[in-house]
Image (cartoon, rainbow, N blue to C red):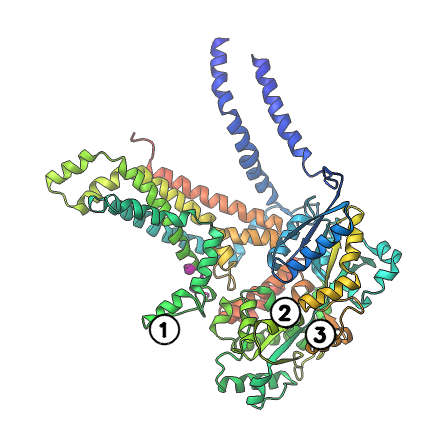
Amino acid sequence: MIARRNRMIPALFILPSLLFLGIFIYIPLVQNFYNSFFDFSVFSPTKEYVGFSAFEQLFADKVVMTAFINNIKYAIISVIFQVAFALVLATILEDKLFRRIAPMLRIIYFIPVMISISVIALLFNFIYNPQMGLLNSFLELVGLESLALPWLGNATTSIYAVIAMSQWQSIGFITMLFIVAIQKIPKELYEAANIDGAGKIRQFFNITVPQVKEALFVNMLITITGAMLVFNEPYILTNGGPGTSSMTLSVYMYQQGFFKDNMGYASAVATLIFVVTAIFALIQIKVSGTGKDE
Amino acid sequence: MKKTLCFSILLLLLSTLLAACNSGEEQSANADGKVEIDFFHRWPNEPRKSFYDEKVKEYMEQNPDVHINVDYVLNDAYKEKVRVLVSSDELPDIFTAWSDSFAENLVSSERIMPLNEVIQEDEEWSTKIIDSQFGGFTFDDTTYGVPFTVDGKAFFYNKAAFEENNIEIPKTYDELIAALDKLQSAGYEQPLVEGLTNTWAISHYLGTIFERVVDPAVLEKDYNEETAEFTDQGYIQGLEMFEELTGYMGDVSTAIDHEAARNMFAAGEVPVLYMQFAEIKMVEEAGDVEFGFFDFPEVEGAAGDPTALTGAPEGWMVSKNAPEETIDFLKFLTSEETAAEFTKTDGQLNAIEGAVTEENVNPTSLEAYELITNASSTAPWFDNAVNINVADVFMRGGQSLATGQATPEDILKEAQQEAANQK
């Protein structure tokens, strides 16, 4: 009886979180998968079973392909700027040379993270504005009129304009996570390296990078899944336009579901997003082999 | 021990279930016994927001036992929000609706109140509303909405710019192109402008162009979801015309919205703009250009209707579960008094007889009003006329045409596919 009771108590502790996870995450997930086999609209209470046809449509859909490629671009650029560049930034901020102004710089870099995304999008709308935008005015000022473009209205630049805004916003957050990780590195390692005559760059690659491996992995996971799920930025800035040039999977899912009333198809897109993010997460966990080395 | 555990789990599960059942039921009377009406409109922008805030206040003063909750979001967001709300029990008691397919979709949810009896019961009120405007809200002889604002779309031009360059008002599409060329060579970098980030603006263009170039019988067939095919070559011609027109709009058009385009027109930067009559007052307030308007010109040799006016009424719909008092509030909103005051404040014309006069509108608007009420036939906005999936192909396609990412043939092919998917 006592052994039994002991086994029950931990179960009881995790029960509330399990219950919430179940109701708000796992059940909707299964339900979404189930919905993707039906064709229905929000207006009608009846659902028509269509089997795998939504998935067939999904793989033949050119917009899904465009959106997927845009998400991949988002992920690659985000990893370069938010993970690689943020790590460099964090190292610089933690360097002795910057001790004095580092706290101020940290705040400056972190401010964009605290601003609402809608406000930022509105702000960038003004920056990108072709007639009176800051960006084009700046280019004209330095004599680069030829580079001035209607950034959000041009099919080739729109997605990059959207991505650029995200980098500006999120880099401070990732930098902060790296700073915390760097602060946990024992100082003796750097001192020893100094005595051995290792320079700053050598120290960065041989001490900082291996020591923040865990944080690096977590940040990669955050940025890549974030890039696969990105919705707010493209939705507010361009709504996927012009045409479908800056469409992402989440925006497409939203439009299919709530703008065009193809709830079944939207569920299929949602399933695709889930599968893609799950695969990425699994690959990363496998590759980094995290949790083993502590 | 085991029993208590089982019991507590059961209790937890039950409580969540109960909580789920509890929401969404009856909320029509609040704590102090007042009847609550949820009122949802799509004008968070001035002057209408204040106008409706005023009216709601006025109504609540006259009827102390009624409390009205107002909520609002802007155009495109409104369309999305209403679609979501109508699928739940949260549908507001009274709300704005466009006519035709937008209204039809809402009606198909079976949550909208049929208004035939209400209209028949109170003829003093209902006969004041211009009869022809009910059409877009009537499906299978049942009326589900009360039209309020009427509208139409035309090319507005800067009178000074036309006079300086000796340009006559174009009677045909070719003359329009010639006029735009002339304006361009006179120094207007963009003789025409539109905010193409607003996809509805594209649908307005395409809708009218199709009216002009496609046989009305074919249009009627294609606008019906059951028989839509979109195989007529007129659509190609129409899309080519749109592509040609976007050529005059310059690079900025795909990056700005309609409001920015209107401000450019009002500032005299751009001499021609395709816009709604409802915007006349806004242009007058934003700038001091003198302007007139002309209907979208006829396309020579095309099979379409050369004079059909594009424009549809907007009105009010009532939820099936709305409290009785909502009907009274509806009548208040569409009364001659409210309507006259509305047009005076906002400038948009309305469907209430006697509420648009020389006293509350300017001569340009009055001219437009006569055009609307006398038009041989009116065509609804394109995005309301066809299935939204097909409309979206054309609207996004319009953006792609402007940025050179697609050809008219690509778009039409996609539209045909989408139309076939809808059957």
Task: Say whether mark 3 and mark 1 are on the same chain.
Answer: no
User: Percent from the top left, x then y, of residue A111?
Assistant: 38, 48
**Residue B384 vs residue A129, the one in the foreground:** A129
* Residue receiving disc 3: B309
**Residue B153 vs residue B241, the one in the foreground:** B153
Disc sitting over residue B204 in the figure: 2
Q: Is residue A90 magenta?
A: no
Q: In the image, B159: left or right of B109?
A: left
* Residue receiving disc 1: A145
Task: Say whether mark 2 and mark 3 are on the same chain.
Answer: yes
User: Percent from the top left, x then y, of residue B162?
Assistant: 58, 86
Q: Chain of mark 1?
A: A
Q: Above or below — where is A131 with respect to B98?
A: below
User: Percent from the top left, x then y, of residue A4?
Assistant: 49, 12
Question: Residues under labels 1 and 3: Cα distance?
Answer: 42 Å
Q: In the image, B230: left or right of B180?
A: right
As shown in the figure, which amino acid type bears the numbered disc 1? Glu
Q: Say few, some or many: other residues with alpha carbon within 10 Å of mark 2 (under 14 / 14 to 19 / 20 or more).
A: many
Q: Chain of mark 2?
A: B
Q: Earlier in the sequence, mark 3 or mark 2?
A: 2
As shown in the figure, which amino acid type bears the numbered disc 2? His
Specify the segment rendered in magenta: A155-161
As shown in the figure, which amino acid type bears the numbered disc 3? Leu
Q: Chain of mark 3?
A: B
**Residue B71 vs residue A89, the one in the foreground:** B71
- Quadrant of the image for the C terminus of chain B? bottom right
